[in-house]
């Protein structure tokens, strides 16, 4: 952990990570002297109630920690720090969406103050073998999103063809190999979850002895002049 005195004396010049936990009530302006090197800023455990509007001057800043302070709302200036890591930007988006959700939630009816934000704080360390037993992270596919937002029907149909070929087909292959699969389709107002299940005996027999459809024949039959 660093000290405010060392920062003000210029002894921390060139560092990439700065941690100050000394009861700060105002953002130390001397931090801006580290703008050309500072990437991680930890101001947790102080008494800060605001961040400066010119915080984006820290143009190399990727991560900032500000938990356990006196903030009453998420400082808007954080959204202007374009060099925040992709994970930090994702968390920022989650905070905004949670704020909108909680603002209209019935839990606010019994409170004198409405919930206007939330903070995520993690401590401790995972067990050594946690990574071995952890499930694989889900793959998030945004192929359909852009065309849907632009109401581009043709683009949306082409996006579905891409999803069929590169997402659905591999999933079906894994299902056929016996691996359980889950597909979640998310829209603006609702979502649907589809889990694979082992086919019943009747389904296996019907698939094995089902007659070939005309569409299948036409799809594989060579064209004749």
Image: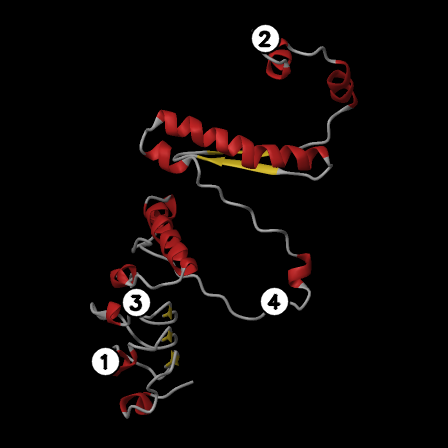
Disc 1 + disc 4, Cβ < 8 Å: no
**Disc 1/disc 4 C-alpha distance (Å):** 36 Å
Disc 3 + disc 1, Cβ < 8 Å: no
First along the sequence among labels 2 and 3: 3
- Name the outermost residue toward the left: 53
Tell me the mark number nearer the camera, choosing from 1 and 2. Answer: 2
**Disc 2/disc 4 C-alpha distance (Å):** 64 Å
Rendering coords of residue 166 (x, y %): 55, 36
Residue 224 numbered mark, or none = 2
- On screen, 98 above or below 209? below
First along the sequence among labels 1 and 2: 1
Q: Quadrant of residue 183?
A: top right
Tell me the mark number nearer the camera, choosing from 2 and 3. Answer: 2
- Dot 4 lies on which element? loop
Tell me the mark number nearer the camera, choosing from 3 and 1. Answer: 1
Q: Which residue is mark 1?
A: 29
- Dot 1 lies on which element? helix
Q: Which residue is mark 3?
A: 71
**Disc 1/disc 2 C-alpha distance (Å):** 79 Å
């Amino acid at each position: 952990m660093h000290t405010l005195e060392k920062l003000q004396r210029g002894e921390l010049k060139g560092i990439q990570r700065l941690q100050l936990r000394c009861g700060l009530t105002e953002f130390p302006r001397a931090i801006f002297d580290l703008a050309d090197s500072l990437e991680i800023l930890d101001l947790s455990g102080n008494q800060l109630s605001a961040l400066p509007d010119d915080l984006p001057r820290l143009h190399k800043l990727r991560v900032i920690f500000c938990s356990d302070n006196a903030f009453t709302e998420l400082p808007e200036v954080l959204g202007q720090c374009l060099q925040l890591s992709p994970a930090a930007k994702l968390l920022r988006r989650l905070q905004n969406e949670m704020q909108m959700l909680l603002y209209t939630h019935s839990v606010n009816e019994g409170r004198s103050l409405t919930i206007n934000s939330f903070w995520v704080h993690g401590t401790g360390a995972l067990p050594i073998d946690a990574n071995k037993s952890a499930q694989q992270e889900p793959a998030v596919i945004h192929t359909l999103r852009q065309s849907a937002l632009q109401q581009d029907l043709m683009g949306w149909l082409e996006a579905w063809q891409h999803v069929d070929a590169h997402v659905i087909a591999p999933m079906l292959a894994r299902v056929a190999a016996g691996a359980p699969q889950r597909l979640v389709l998310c829209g603006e107002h609702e979502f649907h979850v589809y889990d694979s299940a082992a086919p019943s005996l009747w389904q296996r027999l019907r698939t094995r002895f089902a007659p070939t459809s005309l569409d299948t024949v036409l799809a594989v039959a060579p064209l004749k002049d």
